[in-house]
Image (spheres, rainbow, N blue to C red):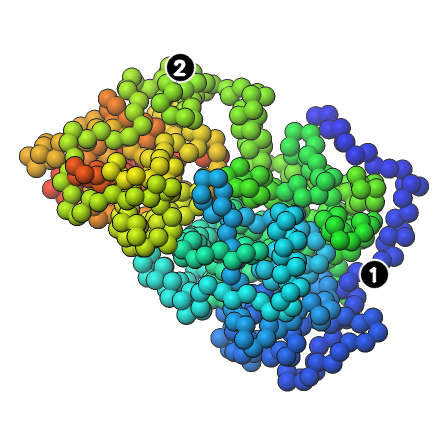
Amino acid sequence: MDQPVRRDPIPASESVDKSRVLEIRPLRSLAPVFPSQPNASFSTPVGGHFFCVPPYGPFPAEVTPFYPFFGSIGSQRRPEQNPQTPVGVPNQAAGSGYSNPVIAAVPIASFRTPPPTAQVNGDRSHGRSQSQSGFAEEECSDSLNQGAEFLSSFSMHTTDLDDTSKSKRAKNKSQRKARGSQETSVNFSDADVDLIFNNILSSYNLMEFSMVRRADGDRKSVGYILLIFDLLRRKLSQFEDTKEPTAGTIRRPDLKASTVLTNKGIRTNVKKRVGDVSGVEVGDIFYFRMEMNLVGLHFPCMAGIDYIGLKISQEEEAAAVSIVSSGGYEDNVEDGDGDVLIYSGQGGNIFRKDKEIMDQKLERGNLALENSFRRGNEIRVIRGIKDVATLNGKIYVYDGLYKIQESWVDKGKSGCNVFKYKLVRSPGQPEAFMTWKSVQQWKNGITSRNGIILPDLTSGVESIPVSVVNDVDDVKGPAHFTYVSSLKYSQHVNSVESSVGCTCRNGCLPGNPNCPCIKKNGGYLPCIAHGVLVNPKSLSHECGSSCLCPPNCRNRVSQGGLKVHLEVFRTKDKGWGLRSWDPIRAGAFICEYAGEVIDISKLELGVETEDDYVFDATRTYQPEDDLPCAFNEAMKIPFPLIITAKDIGNVARFMNHSCSPNVFWHPVLRENKEGCDLHIAFYAIKHIPPMMELTYNYGSVLPDKAMRKNNCLCGSSKCRGYFY
C-alpha cells in the first residue's frame, strides 16, 4: 500500500533546534507548596513559587477546593483519615485519581472561596440558550480542550467554561469583575439532588453497585454507569427548564450529574492505563466529555491530551494514554484513508485572544506525546465530530488505538512553532470514524450508497427519505405495503379524563402552571431538548388535535415524523432490518409504530392476527440482565392496543427483535374532543452510532394466548434462543 502524502512535510533537521526546546523543564519538576499538617496555615508564596491545594480539606479561608470537591467543604478530610472514601475520589498519595501525574501549579489568586453569603455546591446555576425550535441547547465548547490553564480533569469552575459567543464572553467577563469572587448559587440543594438520585435508583432497580465499584469495568458496568448518568442528567435538565435563565451563565446538568456519580463512587476504570479500557468498545459514542471520564476512557474534561507517569528506573516520565481530536486546533488534519491523523500539540495561547500567541513548548501533554513516540506505546484516539443538532456541540467517537509514527515542529497558521504528531491506526480494529466519513459522503452526494434498490421507501410521505439497501442477496425489496406516517384508528376511544386542550399558541413552555397538558404530565414536559424522553416509566400525554399549540410544540415530539435518516437494509439471516445514518442520543425519539389498530371488540372475542407485522402492547417482558426494569417491564396503558402493519405501516415494521435491544417502546396518549388515541413511540435506550441495527424486545404473550416460537438470531451474549 502506498504511503499517504502528508500535507505538512517534516522540515529538515537543521531548520529546527530541538535541543533548545528539550531544555525546557517539565512542570512536574516544580515542587508545589503544601502545609506540613492538616490544620497548618497556608503562607503566601514568595519569589517565583507556585501554590497548589490538595483536593481534600481543610482549606484556608482564601482557597476553595478543585471541582468537583467543593460540594461539602466542611466534611472533607484527608483520604487516609476517612475509611469510607468511595472509589473514584482521588488519592494523590496513591498516585491515582483524576489529575494528570504532571500537575501544573496554580497561583493562589485563581481559586478563591466565595463569601459566607454565597452558597457553594457541586454545581453552579447556569442559564440556557434557546435554539430556533425552542429547545434548550446543551453544549460543551471544545475550544479550550487543550488549554494550559486547565491543570487537570476537574481543576476548573463550571462558571468559567468557554462560551463561544463573543458578546456573552464580554458580558460574563464584566459580570465576574463586578461581583469579584462571589459565585452564583445553584438551583438545587444537595438534598434535592440526592432525592432525585435515590428515586432514579429505586425506580429503575439500580440499587446494587458492586459491579461498578471495581477498579476495572466490563461492558455491563460501563453501560449501567452511562445509563445512570444520563437518567440523572435528563431529570436535572427537566427541572432546570422550569427555572428562569440567569443572564451570562450556562446551565450544565451534565457536570452536576457527573459530580454526583463521582462523589458516590459510581464510576469504573478509575486507574489510568495504556491501551484498551475494559467495557469500552471501538465505535462507542459519547455526547458529553464527562461520560468518557466516568468510564475511564479519557479523564480530562477539557484538555485534549491525557497522560500518566511511568517509572523508568529511578525516574518517572509522562506517557500519553489518550487524545481527543475535535478540530479545536487550526492545524489538526486528517490524512490518507482516515486511519492517519496529524495531531497538533497543546499550548501557545492559540485560543487566548487576550494573550500573545507564542511557540508551543515541550511540556505536559506535548512531552507525554514525545515520550510515547519514543516508547512506541499505543494511544486511544477519540474523534470529536460536529453535532448538527446543537450550535457548538460535539459527538465523541472512540476510534481505537493508534501509534505515533513521526513527530516534528512546524510553523502553524499563526506563524508560531507548533508540535505535530503523525498517528497511525493499529490494524485489525473495527471501523469507527471511517463509517462516519462514509455516511457523510453519502449525504453530501460525494459518493453513492452501494446496494440501494429504492431511494425513498416513503414516496415523499416523510420529510427525510428512507432508502432500501440490499448488498446481501438478489431480493428486490420487501413485500408491498402502503406507507403511512402514523396510526390509523377506526374510531376514537372514550377518554376517562377531561380532554380540555391547551391554548399555548406559541407552544407549551416548561414551568407554565396554566397549561393543562403540562399538568397531565405531572407539571413537566415529558421531553427535554432534542426530543429526549425524561421518564421512560410513565405514560406521556402529548398535545392533541384540540390543542391550539403549533406542530413544532415541544409537547408534540412523536408527531413530527422521522427525525433521523433511516435505511431499511437486508440482513444476512433475519430478513429486513432497520438502521440509521445519523447518530442517536440516549432517550431520543426515533419513530412511532404506524399501522391499523385492530378492533378492540375482536380482542374481547379472542380473535388474534397471525401476520408477522403485529405490535401487541399487552405483552409481558422477562427480566433481562443487560437492562434495568424500566426498559423490559410491561408498561401500564389505559386500554389494550394491538396494531397490525401488514398492509399499511412505516419503518417501524422492519425493526427486529433482540434479547439485548438498544431501543424501547413508550406509550403516548393524545387526547381530543372526541376521545383519545394511544400511540407507540420508540426511543433509544443508549447512544446509538450510525449504521448500527435498531432493535427492541418483542416481549412475550400472556399465558392464556397460544403463539408460535421463533428462532432468535440476535447474536447477543444474553440471547434466549427464541422470541414470540
Residue 248, position as x, y percentages in the image: 57, 56
Q: Specify whether residue 417 is in view.
A: yes
Q: Quadrant of the C terminus?
A: top left
Q: Nearer the viewer, residue 715 or 267?
A: 267
Left or right: 699 as drawn, with respect to 354: left
Disc 1 to disc 2, how far (Cα)? 66 Å
| SS type, badge 2 | loop
Quarter of the image where one finds residue 94? bottom right
Residue 550, position as x, y percentages in the image: 35, 37
Residue 410, position as x, y percentages in the image: 82, 41
Q: Residue at x 50, y 52 (%)?
A: 128
The three-letter code of the residue at mark 1 reads Arg
Instruction: Determine crowd level at label 1: few under 14, some 14-19, many 20+ residues with C-alpha closer than 10 A.
Output: few
Q: In the rendered structure, which disc, 1 or 2, sits on the residue that comes first in sequence?
A: 1
Q: Nearer the viewer, residue 535 or 87?
A: 535
Residue bearing the label numbered 1:
25
Residue 572, position as x, y percentages in the image: 40, 26
Q: Is residue 708 above or below residue 17?
A: above
Q: Residue at x 79, y 34 (%)?
A: 8
Q: Quadrant of the N terminus?
A: top right
Left or right: 225 as drawn, with respect to 379: left
Left or right: 417 as drawn, with respect to 261: right
Q: Nearer the viewer, residue 497 or 481?
A: 497
Q: Residue at x 30, y 43 (%)?
A: 503
| SS type, badge 1 | loop
Instruction: Determine crowd level at label 2: few under 14, some 14-19, many 20+ residues with C-alpha closer than 10 A.
Output: few
The three-letter code of the residue at mark 2 reads Asp
Q: Is residue 384 above or below residue 198?
A: above
On residue 474, the disc is 2
Residue at far right of view: 14
